[in-house]
Amino acid sequence: MDRKIKLYLLLVIAERGKGDQINDRIARNAFGFVTLLGHGTAKKHWLNLLGIGNIEKDLVAVLLSDDEIANARAVLEEEFQIGKGGGVAFTLRVQSIADKRVLDFFLGETEV
């Protein structure tokens, strides 16, 4: 019987320039990932509260299985100080993807 894979979207807001390093460490077993250049508009006191002082950020989005989430979060905390002043990260459970063809692509079961 096939095990159902639970997918999570891990979103990381990190210092500008850290996105590629984060992807190199946590996206090895990812179903997909992207790094975007962000420019925030939040007020300074909110940025200080979240520990992300500068508004120039990298936004990293990584699609991982439930088996990979704990390892990715540990790497983010230990190596990149995410959640400890080096940025923020959170996960969202992916309940559905556009259709089975897209899911098969992310699972490596089909090509474009």
Image (cartoon, rainbow, N blue to C red):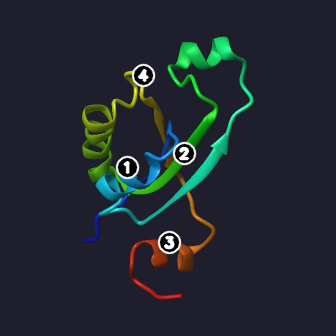
Residue at the (56%, 13%) spot, across then down: 49
Asked if marks 1 and 2 touch (Cβ < 8 Å), the reply is yes
Between residue 101 and residue 64, name the one nearer to us. 64
Would you call the spot at circle 3 few (<14 residues within 10 Å), some (14-19), or many (20 or more)? some
Count neighbours of disc 1 (C-alpha within 10 A) and say few if under 14, some if 14 to 19, many if 20 or more: many
Report the disc number at residue 85.
4
**Identity, as a three-letter code, of the amino acid under mark 3:** Leu
Q: Earlier in the sequence, mark 4 or mark 1?
A: 1
Q: Residue 50 in the image: x percent, y percent?
A: 54, 19
Cα–Cα gap, marks 1 and 3: 24 Å
Distance from disc 1 to disc 2, alpha carbons, whole Å, reads 10 Å
Query: Which label sits in the foreground, 3 or 4?
Result: 4
Q: Residue furthest bottom?
A: 111
Q: In this view, does 95 lie above or below 101?
A: above
Does residue 34 appear to the left or right of 72 in the view shown?
right
Seen at 63% across and 68% down, the residue is: 98
Name the residue tied to disc 1.
Answer: 22
Observer-nearest of 53 and 12: 53
Tell me whether the residue at label 4 lies in contact with that at label 1, contact meaning CB atoms closer than 8 angstroms: no
Position of 98 compared to 93: left or right? right
Residue 90, percent across and down? 47, 36
